[in-house]
Image (spheres, rainbow, N blue to C red):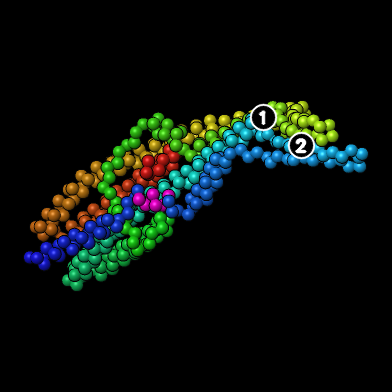
């Protein structure tokens, strides 16, 4: 009895370790967003932009100016200290430009993050679907094997011809080949996931496909509002608009008179202190060509944002419609197959229990059940694909 309890405890401990080692979809996405090398350039660019934005205004170094007497009856030595004052309006425009660059880098990185997260979602779900399909293919191989053996017995008893047995052997080989193909596809996907999240392939265990109940999504207006708030490409266009606005501010700053320099000095020859200032006068640069160009770019950026918002609304409506359609098809097939599957399982139980009819009859019914499960799995794949497209069009990730 003690040995039995110890054996059960060991099995439970082993099961617990294996369950703990499984990596959920959320964890895989988080690891990918942290370790995926494809996001590294965007992360570096964002850090550089943030450093540039945080830097304070740097004054130009002052100058010390000397004027000694040369070939003169008098000996004197004039000196002066010249300062270059930064233009406050230009500083403001440059600060706006650096902030727009940071916003653009943030949007570009977020675009990459959304794409990576959705790609991981698709691969993870596809692996789960393949894993379930492989289990169904294994069941089908078992049914085909039993049918093949049964027909071979009938051939030996001269009940059926060798052609029937040969056809079933071909079907069995096809089922086995399909199972090997599914296994290779699973290995490829698992290898890609392991590389992106930085974990050894042999230690990566994924959760099985969940038993989900899909429902029609919420109203499209809410989805459009979410997309207009989250879409990183729209944020990028907004950052480009902010940069165009900073260019307008810079052009306007150039039209404001400001000190080129301020100079304080002492004249030894006249024994006097003096202060000089040079102010730039935007007479020749006061023309409006540069400002017209800056304003034109600003208008184009505004038009691009308006057009993008309309395009996003259309994309979200189409994605939401596709997702709802896929969910409705899944619900319909699940209901139809559920009723037929229940009756078929009862019939199989009766045939097996009372040994009525040919043994291959319940095997063929079992094969029908496997085919029905695979069809429903294909519909579930279409739901996941539509959901991934919905994530992209709304700017969300599976973590949101």
Please name whichever residue, 312 or 335, is drawn nearer the observer in this view of the structure: 312
* Residue 309, position as x, y percentages in the image: 50, 32
Please name whichever residue, 166 or 187, is drawn nearer the observer in this view of the structure: 187
Q: Which residues are magenta?
A: 27-33
- Residue at x 66% of width, y 34% of height: 86
Identify whether 233 is placed above or below 32: above
Could you tell me how far apart the alpha carbons at marks 2 and 1 are, in whole angstroms?
A: 29 Å
Q: Is residue 276 left or right of residue 312?
A: right
- Of pointers 2 and 1, the one earlier in the residue sequence: 2
* Residue 329, position as x, y percentages in the image: 32, 41
Q: Quadrant of the C terminus?
A: top left
- Residue at x 41% of width, y 34% of height: 226
Give the residue pinned by disc 2.
80
Q: Quadrant of the N terminus?
A: bottom left
Count neighbours of disc 2 (C-alpha within 10 A) and say few if under 14, some if 14 to 19, many if 20 or more: some
* Residue 78, position as x, y percentages in the image: 81, 37
Mark 2: which secondary structure?
Answer: strand
Examine the residues drawn in magenta and state their main secondary structure.
helix
Q: Is residue 358 left or right of residue 133?
A: left
Please name whichever residue, 134 or 49, is drawn nearer the observer in this view of the structure: 49
Asked if the stretch drawn in magenta spans residue 83, the answer is no
Mark 1: which secondary structure?
Answer: helix
Give the residue pinned by disc 1.
253
Q: Is residue 351 left or right of residue 374?
A: left
Identify whether 386 is placed above or below 188: above
């Amino acid at each position: 009895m003690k040995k039995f309890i110890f054996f059960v405890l060991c099995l439970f401990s082993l099961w617990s370790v294996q369950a703990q080692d499984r990596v959920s979809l959320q964890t895989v996405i988080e690891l990918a967003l942290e370790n995926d090398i494809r996001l590294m350039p965007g992360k570096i660019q964002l850090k550089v932009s943030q450093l540039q934005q945080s830097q304070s205004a740097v004054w130009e170094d002052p100058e010390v100016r000397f004027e000694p007497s040369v070939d003169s009856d008098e000996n004197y030595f004039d000196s002066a200290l010249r300062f270059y004052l930064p233009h406050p309006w230009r500083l403001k425009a440059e600060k706006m430009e650096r902030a727009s660059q940071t916003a653009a880098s943030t949007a570009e990185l977020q675009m990459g993050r959304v794409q990576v997260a959705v790609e991981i979602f698709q691969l993870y779900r596809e692996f789960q679907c393949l894993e379930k399909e492989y289990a169904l293919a294994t069941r089908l191989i078992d049914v085909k094997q039993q049918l093949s053996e049964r027909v071979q017995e009938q051939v030996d008893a001269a009940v059926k011809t060798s052609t029937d047995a040969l056809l079933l052997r071909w079907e069995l080989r096809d089922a086995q080949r399909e199972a090997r193909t599914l296994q290779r596809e699973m290995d490829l996907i698992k290898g890609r996931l392991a590389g992106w999240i930085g974990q050894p392939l042999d230690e990566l265990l994924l959760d099985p496909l969940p038993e989900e109940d899909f429902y029609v999504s919420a109203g499209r207006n809410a989805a459009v509002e979410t997309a207009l708030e989250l879409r990183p490409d729209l944020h990028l266009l907004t950052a480009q608009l902010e940069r165009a606005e900073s260019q307008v501010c810079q052009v306007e700053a150039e039209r404001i008179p400001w000190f080129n320099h301020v100079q304080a000095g002492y004249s030894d020859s006249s024994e006097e202190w003096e202060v000089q200032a040079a102010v730039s006068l935007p007479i020749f640069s006061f023309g409006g060509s540069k400002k017209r160009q800056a304003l034109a770019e600003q208008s184009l950026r505004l038009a691009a944002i308006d057009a993008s918002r309309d395009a996003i609304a259309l994309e979200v409506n189409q994605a939401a419609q596709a997702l709802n359609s896929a969910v409705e098809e899944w619900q319909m097939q699940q209901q139809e197959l559920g009723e037929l599957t229940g009756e078929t399982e009862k019939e199989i139980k009766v045939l097996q229990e009372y040994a009525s009819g040919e043994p291959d009859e319940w095997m063929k019914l079992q094969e029908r059940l496997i085919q029905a499960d695979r069809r429903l799995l294909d519909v579930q794949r279409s739901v996941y694909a539509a959901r991934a497209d919905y994530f992209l069009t709304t700017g969300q990730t599976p973590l949101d």
